[in-house]
Image (spheres, grey):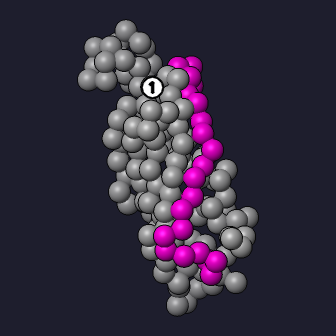
Amino acid sequence: MAEIEWFDDLRVGMKFKTASWQLAASDIKRFAWEYDPQPMHLDEDAAAKTIFRGLAASGWHTASIAMNLVVQSRPFGRHPIIGMGVDGLRWTAPVRPGDVLDLEGEIVSLIPSTTKPHGSVVTNWAMNNQNGELVYTFSPITIVPRR
């Protein structure tokens, strides 16, 4: 397949897979202290008494990991990931210490701009843990330059 770099190189149905990311309890707590300081993200004993029944990553931490994995995978070549919004954002299962996460994405929409030198791309991304359990989905709308 030719190198993907421009909007013009993309096709509906193209698929992407990222590297994986392993999450430690210390990562979960560090993120929570700074951005989402709730018991289920900070303390194992307190988390055991919540609906999660154990320490779980903040959903926003999961979203941040997903963003990192997408950026590192460079689905649109050298261009930065510039978003216009996100549809279909869902947290479907808790992310736990020790989980190994990865993403698979598929382009579902390509809309060339009629007034600007770019197009918008909608990619459905699904994050799974090491057991193949779906933990997070999102469909960002991304600006990708045209030739």
**Residue 26 shown in magenta:** yes
- Dividing the picture into quadrants, the one containing residue 92 is top left
At 49% from the left edge and 22% from the top edge, which residue is drawn? 97
* Three-letter amino acid code at the position of disc 1: Arg
At 52% from the left edge and 23% from the top edge, which residue is drawn? 98
**Looking at the image, can residue 21 be seen?**
yes
Q: Nearer the viewer, residue 127 or 115?
A: 127
Q: Quadrant of the C terminus?
A: bottom right
Whole-percent x, y for residue 133 in the image: 39, 37
Density class for disc 1 (Cα within 10 Å; few <14, some 14-19, many ≥20) is: many
**Residue 39 shown in magenta:** no
* Relative height, residue 45 to residue 145 (above, below): above
Q: Quadrant of the N terminus?
A: bottom right
Q: Nearer the viewer, residue 34 or 68?
A: 68
Whole-percent x, y for residue 81 in the image: 61, 61
Whole-percent x, y for residue 33 in the image: 51, 24
**Looking at the image, can residue 84 be seen?**
no
Q: Which residues are magenta?
A: 7-32
* Relative height, residue 102 to residue 120 (above, below): above
88 left or right of 9 in image: left
Label 1 sits on residue: 96
At 26% from the left edge and 23% from the top edge, which residue is drawn? 51
- Dividing the picture into quadrants, the one containing residue 134 is top left
* Relative height, residue 92 to residue 112 (above, below): above
Q: Residue furthest front?
A: 1
Q: Residue furthest top?
A: 45
Q: Nearer the viewer, residue 45 or 123?
A: 123
* Relative height, residue 106 to residue 18 (above, below): below
User: Could you say whether the residue bearing mark 1 is in a helix, strand or loop?
Assistant: loop
